[in-house]
Amino acid sequence: MVAWTWRFETSDGTEVQPAVQPEDFTTQGDAESWLGEYWKPIAEGGADQATLFEDRTKVYGPMSLHPEETPGT
């Protein structure tokens, strides 16, 4: 069975344990939905970026867990 998992890192690429522990997901959509729900407490817990894996194959990432800065704010 394929497992979709997240790796969480600080901005320098050091792996960190997330504030909310993810499960192994059976679909990419489930994994992405979960991150969409929990990204904020994970970022507040010290993770800066996330990478998605299908089994041991990197699908994409690292992507920032911080909202983009809007100029003038």
Image (tube, rainbow, N blue to C red):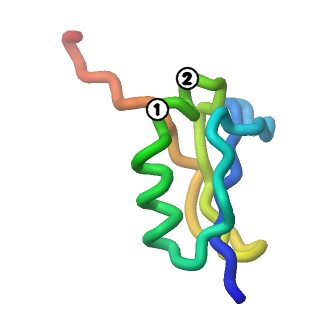
- Image quadrant in which you'd find residue 10: top right
Quarter of the image that includes the N terminus? bottom right
The residue sitting at 51% across, 39% down in the picture is 64
Classify mark 2: helix, strand or loop.
helix
Q: Looking at numbered disc 2 in the image, what kind of residue is underneath it?
A: Glu
- Tell me where residue 60 appears, x and y as whole percent: 56, 63
Farthest left residue in view: 72
Label at residue 30: none
Nearer-the-camera pick, 35 or 67: 35
Quarter of the image that includes the C terminus? top left
The residue sitting at 65% across, 25% down in the picture is 46
- Tell me where residue 53 appears, x and y as whole percent: 66, 67
- Tell me where residue 48 appears, x and y as whole percent: 60, 32
Classify mark 1: helix, strand or loop.
helix
* Residue that label 2 marks: 44
The residue sitting at 49% across, 51% down in the picture is 35
Number of residues whose C-alpha sits closer than 10 Å to that of mark 1, classed few (under 14), some (14–19) or many (20 or more): some
Residue 33 located left or right of residue 12: left
Q: Looking at numbered disc 1 in the image, what kind of residue is underneath it?
A: Lys
- Tell me where residue 12 appears, x and y as whole percent: 73, 31
The residue sitting at 63% across, 71% down in the picture is 4
Real-space Cα separation, disc 1 to disc 2, in angstroms: 6 Å
Number of residues whose C-alpha sits closer than 10 Å to that of mark 2, classed few (under 14), some (14–19) or many (20 or more): few
Label at residue 40: 1
- Image quadrant in which you'd find residue 15: top right
In the rendered view, tell whether residue 61 sits above or below residue 43: below
Given contact means CB atoms under 8 Å apart, are the residues at marks 1 and 2 in contact?
A: yes
